[in-house]
Image (cartoon, helix red, strand yellow):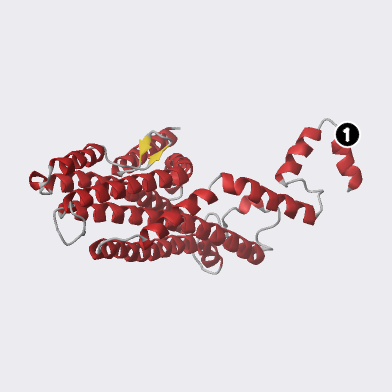
Amino acid sequence: MGDIDQFFQDSHYNITRLLLSISGLWPFHSRNRRYAIYFAMVLILGPGLIFQVIKMLLIKMHEYCLSPKSDKEEKIQNSHALYGRKLGYVYTGFILSQAILYLFTPLLTKFSYVESNKTNELANEELYMIDLDTYFVPIFIHCTVCNLIYTVLLSVFDILYLIVIEYSCGLFIALRSRLEIALDSKLTITKDKCYSNIVYSIRRHTETIQFVAIVESVYSLALSIQTGLTVFIISFLRYQVIKNVQDVNRLVNLFAYLNAVLFTVFFVNWQGQKIIDSSEKVFESAYNSEWYNMPIAARKLLIMIMMRSEKPSGLRIGKIVVLSYITFNTVLRMSSSYFMLLRSL
């Protein structure tokens, strides 16, 4: 091993060796050295990339729960937390069910009498350079475990996305309820109760907008890549469906994969649309408040909220596209265009 490592070190391939060594992929390192490199990469890259931002989100959620607020605000936030948990169960169950259907179809095919043009076709079978029929069971187990782990990891990231979006919507709705009863004397004990309520609302509005901006910074890059790939994946899957109309087992595989992709892209844009709708209604609540009975100082502050809420908050991917129903429709139309192009070839 040392001779091989020295050969690459002294040759023109040294740059390749160096890059693989830095990334922990050089196969001639000892196992302990590779683990040390992986650990160092996590320590160095982790805080600078996403972990610190996620930590910031969770800290802000914790601070809001501990901050003083009305019973109605707390009730609204709790209802959104419960709704997010239930929706998370539904999302995870659907994605895992489609993954299981996709992964276990080859096993059912092997032990059934259904005729197929391509029998015993496994996920990622091209990665295995051995006879699939002879080693079907160990390869199937390896494929299933790896793909399920990958699916669970993606689901965890999506569930966090769902939770923070529901939390943001709860903040906007709690803010609206506060604005609509800004003149209620039961909310505060200061002399200028109305002014105090408007100041409180401005602070909550600012915190909510900042929270949405942090969520965008976490998911913008990942969702932009996902949305771009989804266009081509849907096009390719639809093309494969047309090509394999006579292969029932292959169709089951394709439909399971297609269902999961469509559901995921709809889910992402649906949550983005909820942010837009929730933030837009802040303007309506501010306008519907009894602003005509407020002192002039409170009215001026209320105008600040109305001016800011005229432009709804949203989650942007690539700093350009806003996640919404319109974006979902655009993805479907673009995938249909590429699908027609594939059919014409």
Up the image or down, 343 lies above or below 266; here it is above
Q: Nearer the viewer, residue 18 or 49?
A: 49
Q: Which of 182 and 104 is in front in this view?
A: 182
The answer, for residue 223, to whether it is visible in the render is: no
Q: In which quarter of the image is residue 298?
A: top left
Residue at 37% of width from left, 65% of height from top?
85
Secondary element type, mark 1:
helix
Q: Which of 52 and 22 is in front in this view?
A: 52
- Residue picked out by circle 1: 10
Q: In this view, does 302 lie to the left or right of 170?
A: left
Up the image or down, 144 lies above or below 128; here it is below
Q: Is residue 185 left or right of residue 309?
A: left
Q: Which residue in the rendered view is the most extreme toward the right?
A: 3
Q: Which residue in the rendered view is the most extreme toward the front?
A: 191
Q: Which residue in the rendered view is the most extreme toward the bottom?
A: 111
Q: In this view, does 187 lie to the left or right of 6?
A: left
Q: Where is residue 155 in the image (x, y as percent from the top left)?
A: 47, 58
Amino acid marked by disc 1: Asp
Q: Which of 119 and 129 is in front in this view?
A: 129
Q: Position of residue 82 (x, y in %)?
A: 33, 66
The answer, for residue 92, to whether it is visible in the render is: yes
Residue at 39% of width from left, 54% of height from top?
164
Q: Where is residue 193 in the image (x, y as percent from the top left)?
A: 18, 53
Disc 1 packing (10 Å; few <14; some 14–19; many ≥20): few
Q: Where is residue 125 in the image (x, y as percent from the top left)?
A: 61, 54
Residue at 52% of width from left, 61% of height from top?
103
Q: Which residue in the rendered view is the most extreme toward the left?
A: 292
